[in-house]
Amino acid sequence: MMKSPLSDAYSVLRDVTPLKYNLDCGKLCGNKCCHGSDNDGMELFNGEEKLFENEKGFTVRTDGDRKILICSGKCDRKKRPLSCRMYPFFPIPVEKNGTVGIKVVYDIRGFSSCPIVREHIRPDPRFLRAVRMAGLYLIRDKKNLEILKNTASMFDELVSFSEAVKRKDECNEKKL
Ligand code: SF4
Ligand code: SF4
């Protein structure tokens, strides 16, 4: 039964993990993605902040229109926000013939810290399907579609930036 885009997205990601056989990828890296600073945080989707209003160990920060969740670095897995449930993958909206679909990509923000992203480790297909489904649920809400599109643009900028740096490094190496 359809509930809300948010609760549907939460439920589809409840029992899946990025690696096959439900392996804990935190053992690969010492849970690096949970050890950010207070300047890091997870962007919340529309309405998601209400789920964390009175949750111990979580603070919601506002950045313009964006709501960012700051955590203590440890949490009850059942209470993780959507960003953490989908990480290290992300659902990118793609428009074709007037309809919006979802393509799942590695979350490029994890390139330097997450071995799954850096090494392009193949995820459990069930996890990819769940992230895609979560994306499809989220885009039923216009504000969430906007959040996904903004993140997709930011990924494009990061890719362009890292390609520009790589080209500059190659030029400098040639000069040496
Ligand atoms: S950084 Fe990557 S490998 Fe490590 S726990 Fe997070 S998602 Fe898993
Ligand atoms: S909310 Fe939980 S899963 Fe997400 S970064 Fe914080 S401790 Fe890790």
Image: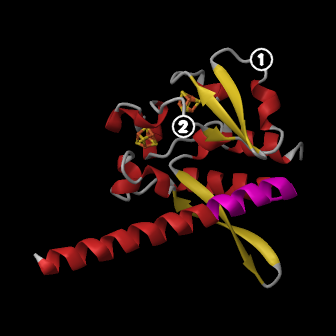
Q: Nearer the viewer, residue 4 or 164?
A: 164
Near mark 2 (Cα within 10 A), the count class, few <14, some 14-19 or many ≥20, is few
- The location of residue 130, given as percent across then percent down, is 64, 51
**Quadrant for the N terminus in the image:** top right
Horizontal relation, residue 57 to residue 120: left or right: right
Disc ID at residue 40: 2
Q: Nearer the viewer, residue 128 or 6?
A: 6
Q: Earlier in the sequence, mark 2 or mark 1?
A: 2
Horizontal relation, residue 103 to residue 5: left or right: left
- The location of residue 56, given as percent across then percent down, is 67, 14
Disc ID at residue 76: none
SS assignment for the magenta stretch, majority: helix
**Quadrant for the C terminus in the image:** bottom left
Q: Residue furthest top?
A: 56
Q: Is residue 151 magenta?
A: yes
**Please, is residue 53 above or below residue 141 in the view?**
above
- The location of residue 53, given as percent across then percent down, is 79, 23
Disc ID at residue 54: 1
- The amino acid at mark 1 is Asn
**Please, is residue 125 above or below residue 16 in the view?**
below
Q: Is residue 39 magenta?
A: no
**Location of residue 98 (image quadrant):** bottom right
- The location of residue 165, given as percent across then percent down, is 35, 69
Q: Which residues are magenta?
A: 139-152
**Location of residue 85 (image quadrant):** top right
Dot in front, 2 or 1: 2
- Helix, strand or loop status at disc 2: loop
Q: Residue at x 58, y 36 (%)?
A: 41
- The amino acid at mark 2 is Asp
Q: Residue furthest bottom?
A: 97
Q: Is mark 2 within 8 Å of ligand 2?
A: no
